[in-house]
Amino acid sequence: MDIKRIDTKDYTKLEDVVNELISHQANGEKVYCVYRGYRLDSENITMDSAYKKVFGITKVEYDAEEKLAMEAIMKEDKIRKEKKKHYQDIIFERTHG
């Protein structure tokens, strides 16, 4: 049986790619795709094996790092908004006080 290549979009999340490969695997199809330069085969794919191959860490580790990054972004955004309000309050007080 030949292994058929399937295409993925550059913006596709790795999790979606792996789920598609697993779906083909469940149907007994042998397919592969190239994701960010890495070949992923339906024959032996798991979520963790794909994440380790592409990112060097497991899916759980990836999710934890992503969560920390989002928390840092949100914290920086909150600080920026607080500073903006503080400066607006100073300007208001100087112009109306």
Image (cartoon, rainbow, N blue to C red):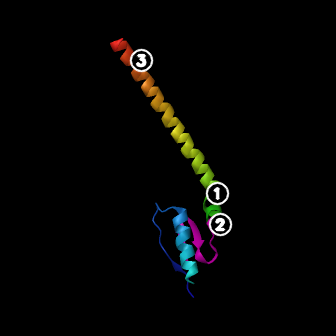
- Name the disc covering residue 49, or none: 2
In space, the residues marked 3 and 2 are separated at their CA atoms by 54 Å
Residue where numbered disc 1 is placed: 60
Q: Is residue 3 left or right of residue 44?
A: left
Disc 2 marks a residue whose amino acid type is Ser
Q: Is residue 48 above or below residue 73?
A: below
Q: Quadrant of residue 81?
A: top left
Quadrant assignment for the C terminus: top left
Q: Is residue 73 visible?
A: yes
Residue where numbered disc 3 is placed: 90
Q: Quadrant of residue 31?
A: bottom right
Q: Which residues are magenta?
A: 31-48
Residue 84 coordinates in the image, percent (x, y): 43, 27
> Who's the residue at 57% across and 80% down the image?
26
> Who's the residue at 52% across and 66% down the image?
16
- Name the disc covering residue 78, or none: none
Within the magenta stretch, is there residue 25? Answer: no
Within the magenta stretch, is there residue 43? Answer: yes
